[in-house]
Image (tube, rainbow, N blue to C red):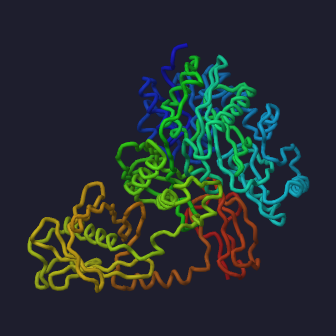
Amino acid sequence: MALFNTILIANRGEIAVRIMATCREMAIHTVAVYSEADRGALHIRQADEAYYIGPAPAAQSYLLIDTIMDIARQSGVQAIHPGYGFLSENADFAQACEQAGIIFIGPPPAAMRLMGSKIAAKNLANSVGVPTVPGYNGACQDDEMLLREAQRIGFPLLIKASAGGGGKGMRAVSTEDNFLSELAGARREARAAFGDATVFLERLIQRPRHIEIQILGDAYGNLIHLGERECSIQRRHQKIVEESPSVAISPTLRAEMGDAALRITRAAGYMNAGTIEFMLDEERRFYFLEMNTRLQVEHPVTEQVIGLDLVRHQLRIAAGEPLGITQEQICQRGHAIEVRIYAEDSQKQFLPSSGIITRFVKPITPGIRIDSGVASGDEITQYYDPMIAKLIVYGEDRPATITRLQQALEHCAIFGVTTNIPLLHTISSHPAFSAGDTSTSFLEEYKLTTPSLPQDTTLPDVVLMVAALSDLKRQIAIQPLPITTPHPKVHHPWLTLGPWRTIGEAWQITYSYHSRSYKLALQMRRDEVDAWTIQIDANPSVEVTGTLHNDALVLLKLGASQIPAYVQQQNGETQVVLAGNFYRLQRRLPPDVRTATHSRTATLTQKTLTAPMAGTIAKVLIDDGATVELHQVLMVLNAMKMEHAITAPCTGKVRHIFYQEGAVVKGGAVLAEME
């Protein structure tokens, strides 16, 4: 069978852009679909054709099988690639493609159904002699039955959704007392994410590693594995760091796990790309977890060390070509690490951060690959996963790759939304990570769930210097000054406005950063271009040169040392990215009636609870007039595929709840009022 002329990509964002890249190389015409929120998205801009499929919520657009199939027929595509997420593991979608005579680029519907049920997949693994984690996989979903099984298994344990993964519908339960409440939350999340509230229970293995095996199989019975990826570093059961090969896997263990993965895959009648996931305990015993019947988010690390384009092979297999690769030809070379850059705020319980990416500066060095579905000017909305990009680094060995990762994170700057780059840099610089001592509890074990970020330390002088130089040069660009230095008798209108003041021959500005003020005095030097003398508070003056570039880069030179930083002015503050850390500096303004009024208003509204971001009210747990305790959960907000608890800020009485379950709210909406 000849390769395809045209395929539809039933997805969005990074994975849609990634698939299109391979399709362009193979001269395959691409058809994209988009929701209202994605009208100007990057994957639409890069497609050959694009079709509107509905409103922003995925349930009204990207999850509509009939709508997508109508567009597939209308555009005359030969095949559909589902990417990951959305319909990628939906057997009904694969079946609909088959019935329409359109090739589904993935496994057969029967194999997807079998392996898509975690309970059925575990039973299959046991039948071919692959061990599974002890637990309960039964059909009975009665609360009391599940509680009895939990008591039999023992605590701590995991409640997991049967119909899907990605951390959705998963809860770690440490004691019997909170089992039923966690069970209810897991079911709600599973139903919202997969349309199926079925769960199963597993013993919680202490300090396990998460190891997965990538497999490829064709329609002729040829089946190979492409080695392992370690995905142990996770937050809320969501992978954030992946690498290949794993330091924990010996050649012998790799062969054993690869053989186990192939036995399971062959028994399932599987073809195309897929991943078998295992848990590895501290004694190097492995247990089957689940199978992902699709291309994984972290597939690039395998591509880097194996040297194969997995999307290209997916397309060839789906087109009926034989695999053409034997197991003996597969070998790992070098080391690759991928980190997922998310729009989220680690200082606010990792709440997703929505907004416009005003500037996205990407590191450009050898061995760096960035897979992203957004660019400068694009929006991160509340409707979809908040991943901005995957940063993949490759090196000749693991130490070299870690160093390259650290450098790449330090030269990546994203403005407009808060990101987890500081956390990723903290992880990459941690001694335990360098030593390969990782587990799924890595963040909790080393207290990195709320890492100590720059706001908890003294503000580096360099941050203040680049902020002031950038702000001053921006003002000069708006209102040009005479070549001579300022003099108090010379009137410059812009100097009388905003945060800048002149004292003698120096410009002065005061920045506020987390309740502390810093006063800077800048004086232009005539002996060198872009040369300045800067004094911070009462410290000795420092001579520097500062060059501004179009991509927000400020190159500060102190003596012979050159320090790169990135600066942007937005919403009355100066934002600085230095060595992977993000700083927000407030430009101090004289007090006026407006700011005084705002301060008073803020005091009066402290007893109102607002939505941290746009979302849907999943659960209301109290009524008007209820008396509540400090930190008691009042409501549950469902946003970006995750649940977020709205808790009482104090002990008191709830005056009024403003929304009912199922209501869609905007970020900042007042949800409840306390007395």
Kindly give the residue lying farthest to the top in the view shown. Answer: 1
All told, the count of numbered labels is: 0
Can the viewer see residue 578? yes
Q: Quadrant of residue 130?
A: top right
**Is residue 607 left or right of 310 when viewed as pictured?**
right
Whole-percent x, y for residue 108 in the image: 68, 26
Question: Where, quadrant-wise, is the N terminus in this rendering?
Answer: top right
Question: Where, quadrant-wise, is the C terminus in this rendering?
Answer: bottom right
Whole-percent x, y for residue 425 in the image: 47, 59
Whole-percent x, y for residue 367 in the image: 40, 42
Q: Quadrant of residue 220?
A: top right
Q: Is residue 404 above or below residue 22?
A: below
Q: Residue at x 73, y 65 (%)?
A: 620
Can the viewer see residue 41? no
**Is residue 126 left or right of 542 when viewed as pictured?**
right
Q: Residue at x 74, y 74 (%)?
A: 624
Q: Residue at x 61, y 56 (%)?
A: 235
**Is residue 198 left or right of 362 when viewed as pictured?**
right
Residue situated in front as seen by the camera: 283 or 350: 283
Residue situated in front as seen by the camera: 387 or 443: 443
Q: Is residue 658 above or below residue 594?
A: above
Q: Residue at x 91, y 56 (%)?
A: 148
Q: Quadrant of residue 491?
A: bottom left
Whole-percent x, y for residue 328 in the image: 58, 24
